[in-house]
Every structure is written in C-alpha cells, then in structure tokens.
C-alpha cells in the first residue's frame, strides 16, 4: 500500500520486470494526503476495501490468500496488517506474506490504539518481514514481524541530514527522508 507518488513505483517496476507476479497497487493518495490524524482514520476504510477486494479476488478467480504478498510503506504497512487480520476474522486463509516497510508509529502505539489488531504483528500473515529505518520517530522500533531488519540500527539512515534531537522543527522534516529508505532497500533486494 503506497501512494504512487512515493517509493511504491520502484517496487512495482522491479517486480513487473521479473514477470513473476500479477501486481495490484492500492493508490490511496486522496485519503492519505489529509492531516495525519485524518489519514490515520482513513487507513481503516482503505483496509476494509482491500479486504473486500481480496475476498472478491478469491471468489471470482480462485486466487488463494496463501499466494498473496502485501507490501506496505508506513501507514500502508498498517493497512496491510489490518486487512490481513480482517481476512482471517472472516474465515479466509492467512495471507502468505506481509512486508512492512518502516511501519508508521505515530498514532499506532499505545495509548492511541484500541487493539493490537490495528498494528502490524506476526499473526497478520503466514510470514511477516519488516524493515525499520526511522524507528522512534515516524516508524515503529519494536519488533513487528517474524523477521525484523534494522539497517544502520533502524533509526538514522545515511543522508538523513539533521538528527531529530538537534532541532525539533528541522529534525522532524529531515527525518522524513529515512522513512523512504526501506523502499530503496527493497528495490535493491529485488534487483
């Protein structure tokens, strides 16, 4: 789950070039470009629609959830988690794999969540792998998958610029850049 204006396009290009998969991109840009708190609320709507689509896909084409790999960046990782969980609650088989690219932290940690169902965890798919690149800032730092990768310690990435501790105003803006790093790491991995 990406917006097409972010790193998702790199992953799509690489996957398509391998000719191994059918690729479906969830472009939720109209809902994600709201104020962050509103975008957070919209993630539940997007996750429900993704769940409905997966059920439709399974019923109309025979696609098994055990062959589905969801990849989500930031809030998109949390959307994939919620959809994976919802599919199971509705009696569908588990999604094969969810890859969380720097899952969003703001409003996805206690006390902002009502249930762990809203947050990426190993129960959301048969295999959950997570790349943490902006932990303790915009991304979660705690383990969220069967396998969690922490490039460069999972917090500050090369080329980030100012660290958030140096200047709160500049630091927040400068730490946006490392949240895009997992897409670059994924792109290089798939090449």
Image: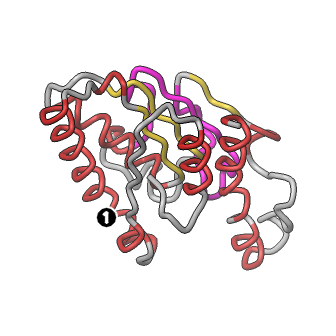
Indicate whether 39 appears above or below 48.
Answer: below
Indicate whether 183 appears above or below 37.
Answer: above
Residue 168 image point, x, y percent: 74, 74
Q: Which residue is mark 1?
A: 42
Nearer to us in this view, 142 or 72? 72
Q: Does the stretch in magenta take in 122?
A: yes
**Which residue does the image show at 53% across and 40% down from the upper left?**
100
Residue 153: quadrant of the picture = top right
Residue 18 image point, x, y percent: 58, 35
**Which residue does the image show at 13% across and 36% down from the upper left?**
60
Q: Is residue 88 left or right of residue 90?
A: right
Residue 138 image point, x, y percent: 61, 58
Q: Is residue 110 left or right of residue 139?
A: left
Give the number of callouts.
Answer: 1
Q: Is residue 105 left or right of residue 131?
A: left
Q: How is the image coloured?
A: secondary structure
Nearer to us in this view, 111 or 130? 130
**Which residue does the image show at 62% across and 29% down from the upper left?**
148
Residue 115: quadrant of the picture = top left
Instruction: Report the predominant secondary structure element of the magenta stretch.
Output: loop
Q: Does the stretch in magenta take in 71?
A: no
**Which residue does the image show at 38% across and 48% down from the upper left?**
24
Residue 41 image point, x, y percent: 32, 64
Residue 40: quadrant of the picture = bottom left
Q: Which residues are magenta?
A: 119-145
Kind of element beneath mark 1? helix
Nearer to us in this view, 102 or 190? 190
């Amino acid at each position: 789950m990406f917006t097409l204006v972010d790193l998702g396009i790199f992953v799509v290009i690489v996957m398509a070039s391998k000719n191994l998969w059918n690729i479906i991109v969830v472009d939720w840009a109209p809902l994600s470009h709201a104020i962050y708190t509103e975008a957070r609320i919209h993630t539940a709507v997007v996750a429900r629609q993704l769940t409905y689509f997966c059920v439709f896909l399974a019923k109309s084409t025979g696609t098994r959830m055990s062959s589905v790999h969801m990849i989500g960046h930031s809030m998109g990782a949390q959307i994939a988690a919620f959809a994976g969980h919802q599919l199971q609650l509705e009696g569908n088989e588990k999604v094969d794999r969810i890859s969380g690219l720097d899952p969003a932290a703001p409003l996805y940690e206690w006390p902002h969540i009502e249930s762990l169902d809203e947050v990426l965890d190993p129960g959301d798919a048969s295999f959950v792998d997570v790349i943490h690149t902006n932990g303790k800032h915009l991304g979660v730092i705690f383990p969220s998958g069967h396998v969690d990768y922490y490039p460069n310690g999972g917090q500050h990435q090369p080329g980030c610029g100012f660290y958030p501790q140096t200047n709160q105003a500049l630091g927040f803006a400068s730490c946006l850049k490392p949240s895009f790093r997992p897409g670059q790491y994924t792109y290089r991995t798939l090449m």
